[in-house]
Amino acid sequence: MSQAFPQTKKIDLRKYGMSSCKILLSSIALVCTLVMLAQVPALASGDIAKGAYIFKTAGCTGCHTRDEDRKNGILLAGGRAFKTPFGTYYSPNISPDPSGIGTWSKENFLNALRHGINPDGANYFPVFPYVSYTKMSDQDVLHLWAYMKTLKPVARKNQDHDVNIIFGSRFLMTFWKLMNFQAGALQPDPDKDKTWNRGRYLVDALGHCGECHTPRDSLGALKGGMYLSGTSNGPDGNTVPNITPDKKTGIGGWTVDDFDSLLSMGMLPDGDFVGGSMGEAIENTESLTDTDRKAIAIYLKTIPAISQKIEKSKSKK
């Protein structure tokens, strides 16, 4: 072991002073950003109709539109609040207005989804689910970009996040990403069929189901080994159910038809209907093709079953 990994001299950063340490950390962050930017491929064009389908599947309107704006037909202007253990984050304007993404290039758009960085090279916070969207194919990103450019522009300045200095630092996010984020499109599993791979892509990339259904650690990263097992501390502190095929605490007893009823109309096997954030998600999944809903069901029935009972949150007064 010592020959394969020869011992190196440890560097004590304390003797160099705080200013030198800051310079070193800044240099590391700059190099990481430049490496990510260099990985952006040459991009072609996208299909608007396909982009509309992806837009709906990815749930862009829900996260980037306030309830009061939706009632008035104002979409994608941002400002929706997301309460987290680290403070409240507000979604940005993603309409094709200069105050939104109107001045972006398609390379800027790909960098946001693939690498979680804005046109200035600064990091986004993972409340924007680029940890999942990075798995989108380049072509689907282009389709989405083509469609979003056709939408109505809305002039509105982005609202500042209400978080403490640590969790509001885009610079420190570089180190969070080094520990918790791996950029790259999802590659098909050659040992699985086309339907299964399509289901995984819809769940893990476009639908970003794990962002709500997988519990997070103290730093807000998705917990490894707990994939889709639910959490009692989901968006806005609400409970999110276990959707692994565990028969007692998950959805192991569901049929493909049960999944279709849920995804097409929000109805559970017991005849009840979902509400809250899942009810909002159904507004997107109801537009999926029958083939895509079936693919999601087939995939979810094959993932590892995890026994984790999620207690429903008490009503807040």
Image: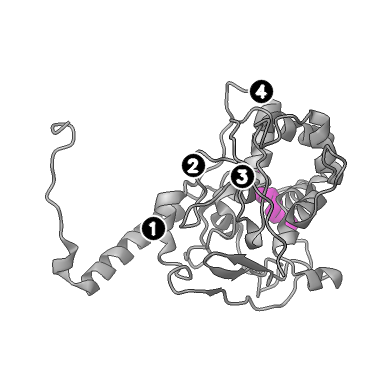
Q: Assign the C terminus to one quadrant of the image.
A: bottom right
Residue mark closest to the camera, 3 vs 1 = 1
Q: In the image, is residue 153 above or below residue 287?
A: below
- Residue occupying the point 68% across, 66% down: 94
Which residue is at 66% across, 23% downward? 193
Task: First in sequence, mark 1 or 2: give its number.
Answer: 1
Identify which amino acid the numbered label 2 is placed on: Gly
Q: Would you name the residue on which mark 3 appears?
A: 136
* SS at mark 3 in the image: loop
Q: CA distance from mark 4 to mark 1?
A: 37 Å
The CA distance from mark 2 to mark 3 is: 21 Å
**Mark 4 crowd level (few <14, some 14–19, many ≥20, 10 Å Cα):** few
Real-space Cα distance between discs 3 and 4?
A: 19 Å
Discs 2/4, front: 2
What residue type is disc 4 on? Asp
| Helix, strand or loop under label 4 | loop
Mark before the other along the chain sequence, 2 or 4:
4
- The residue singled out by tag 2 in the image is 224
- The answer to whether residue 169 of the structure is visible from this angle is yes
Q: Position of residue 158 (x, y in %)?
A: 63, 75
| Stretch of the chain drawn in magenta | 140-148
Amino acid residing under circle 3: Met
Q: Is residue 38 visible?
A: no
Instruction: Find disc 4 in the rendering and name its residue.
Output: 193
Along the polypeptide, which appears first: circle 2 or circle 3?
A: 3
Q: Does dot 2 land on a helix, a strand or a loop?
A: loop
| Secondary structure state at the residue bearing disc 1 | helix
